[in-house]
Amino acid sequence: MCKNCVFIFANRLALPPVKCYDSELAVTIQVQYQAKNAIRRRQRRRTNGKRPAVSGPDIRYDTQEEFSMNIRNNYKHTIAASYIGYVTQAIVNNFAPLLFLTFHDTYQIPLEMIGLLVTINFGTQLIVDLVSAKYVDRIGYRPAIILAHVFAAAGLVGLGFLPELFSNPYPGICLAVILYAIGGGLIEVLISPIVEACPTDGKSAAMSLLHSFYCWGSVLVILVSTLLFAVCGMNAWKQIACLWACIPALNAIYFTQVPIASLTEEGKSMGIRELLHSGIFWVLALLMVCAGASELSMSQWASAFTESGLHISKTSGDLAGPCFFAVLMGSARVFHAKLAEKLNLSRYMGFCALLCIISYLLAALSPIALLSLLGCGLCGFSVGVMWPGVFSIAAEKCPRGGTAMFALLALAGDTGCSVGPTLVGFVSAAANDSLKTGLLTAVLFPALLLFGLFLSKKGVR
């Protein structure tokens, strides 16, 4: 065999050094063998010693073309884009409320009309959830998720400019809210099935980690926006809105490049009618309603509860209430993501439901303000696994559910997000504006979630 043949043979198969009487050839083969092994060791380190779920080009990017090809074949980029998608949803839901008093002072809009903006936002998302169940599979995941980010970016930019186009600024604000609510609703429906469809292990852990980015996004929006308002002044809120719009705009471009798999084979997913005739689907819907209500009943009233119920200043109340809640909720999701393989999901959710009941009782009944704040934070930790956990259980119990199932479950979750805070508000008003009494009634939701988990274990069909 000639030198060339031996060299090519060793290079292709990454053979160990062979005994060779030609010293120059032996050195060449040795170098090639070491180089091949170095590349393989680097790849194993980056995949935690496991083979990648999807094969692709070498991790090194020598040219822009190689980098682009890696994005199109590596599902880690899909998951990263999905994380940013949930940050986008956090921006959509949390930025405008920071401007409510600014709208009131700048445009002289009554507070009750400003309060309706929250209803318009979540009402639009509910409609999008319902429509998506029928049409998203026909449109396709990629066009739909790109469109979602375009709507979110357009709404955030429109928030700064549309009010100026109307003699009455309120319709312009409402139009901007509707635009970014369409984006937020589509993101809620699409991101979970996109991640669930990725050919990776540890789906439950991936789902919890995915949903934790909504929490971190919420904290990011509140802290960064507050800092920018302090540095640039409240008059710069329009420019800050456009700055936040860059995130969904850039992520829309990112989603044009990443690989996106289908959750079920074409024609194999369950239709809406089949889902509605399934007993386990209604159990899952109950779990989602309770998960949304358990979370939002505390988070939406946390600021008012700490300020009026515990007599804490506005700034301290926002940090000790909503931010504390969001940080612990995000931490709970990261904790579950790290230990998902060692935990029984249903049992862990049952434990969290019990912890949620204790946290509501502690917040509502404790005469000590510090313990009530601790109850608020514990509630954030306890509800962290509920929403992503139900999605994971649904994927296991209804593997043919497809996008329609995730859309209808998102609809159920958003219904809980509306029902929970509304019930707390009505009960508090009936009890002479006692928020502690209102929060006490929210114990109903984690208790119902425990009942739903019991039914799911019984194998309801």
Image (spheres, rainbow, N blue to C red):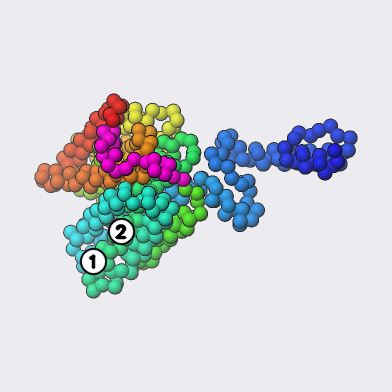
Q: Amino acid at mark 1?
A: Tyr
Q: Secondary structure at mark 1?
A: helix
* Label 2, residues with CA under 10 Å away: few <14, some 14-19, many ≥20: some
**Pointer 2 residue:** 96
C-alpha distance separating marks 2 and 1: 13 Å
Q: As drawn, is 441 to the left or to the right of 374? A: left
Q: Which residues are magenta?
A: 261-284
Callouts 2 and 1 close, C-beta under 8 Å: no
- Residue 391 is labelled as none
Please state, as top left, top right, bottom left or bottom right, where the N terminus lies in the image: top right
Please check the rendered image and state whether residue 434 is part of the magenta-colored stretch, yes or no: no
Q: Residue at x 38, y 53 (%)?
A: 139
Residue 411 x %, y %: 28, 46
Name the front one of labels 2 and 1: 1
Does the image show residue 219? no
**Pointer 1 residue:** 170
Nearest the eye: 299 or 266: 266
Q: As drawn, is 162 to the left or to the right of 48? A: left
Q: Secondary structure at mark 2?
A: helix
